[in-house]
Image (spheres, rainbow, N blue to C red):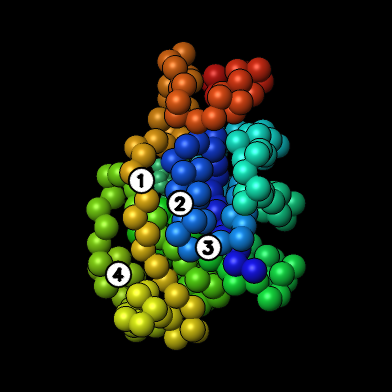
Amino acid sequence: MKIGIFGGTLNPIHFGHLRAAEEVREAFGLDKVLFVPSAFPPHKRKEDLESPFHRIEMTRIAIDGNPYFDYSDMEVRRGGFSYSVDTVEEVRKGLPDAEIHFILGVDAFFEIESWKDYRRFLSLCNFIIVTRPGYEKRSLGESLPLEVRGDFCYDSAKGCYGHTSGHCLNFSEVTLLDISSTEIRKRLKTGKSVKYLLPQKVEEYIKKNNLYKT
Ligand code: ATP
Ligand code: MG
């Protein structure tokens, strides 16, 4: 069983997340992609962060109908700050035989050094780094913190950067959708249309519950 983990604040989830996950799922033959909305993220101002309850509901609604997509409230259940390293370990505990692939955008990957236990985190599972508009794809040598560069070596047989742990780090070019939750929130705040940036049912949920107004 190959499982992808797609974390983030998902505030709200949008087509940039969904399409990247779908393309990665197909390209890497993943059996499941698990969307995991964070509780309280360590790197963000929390003022325009919608409640975990609503972010989970929007995620649930957004993935409805895709048999390969699932979601988990594990970070919200754990409470406090959400750390991906803990999430990977929790997924592993529940599915000891699964091959885990952590999916994240290059923008997030460029900041990996600030993540909790990032060196250990990078050793725990496979990684799939997806492209995102506005963030040029640098070589791994340039994007990896100095401290961990020696942990990776290009594996031409597998076509990925092999980690000393035996896991793989891949770069994956996905359809570049210049969509961000920040821009969606901005538009909602000023009463502008967010149509076609996120699933219609999520847009309806936002309107019905008066989210992102203030
Ligand atoms: P915000 O603007 O609030 O930061 P966001 O759109 O960046 O929101 P996040 O919840 O921060 O979304 O991101 C979750 C994950 O999805 C990250 O790994 C991020 O790199 C990735 N991601 C977000 N938007 C896109 C996109 N348009 N294309 C590819 N990856 C994306
Ligand atoms: Mg972001």
Residue 33: x and y in percent read 59, 55
Image-quarter location of ligand 1: top left
Q: CA distance from mark 4 to mark 1?
A: 20 Å
Q: Nearer the viewer, residue 55 or 199?
A: 199
Disc 1: CA contacts within 10 A as few (<14), some (14-19) or many (>=20): some
Q: Quadrant of residue 66?
A: top right
Crowd class of label 2 (few under 14; some 14 to 19; many from 20; radius 10 Å): some
Give the residue type at disc 1: Thr
Gap between marks 2 and 3 measured at Cα: 10 Å
The amino acid sitting under disc 4 is Leu
Q: Earlier in the sequence, mark 2 or mark 4?
A: 2
Q: Which residue is mark 2?
A: 23
The CA span between labels 2 and 1 is 8 Å
Q: CA distance from mark 1 to mark 3?
A: 17 Å
* Residue occupied by mark 3: 29
Whether residue 27 can be seen here = yes
Q: Residue at x 50, y 84 (%)?
A: 165
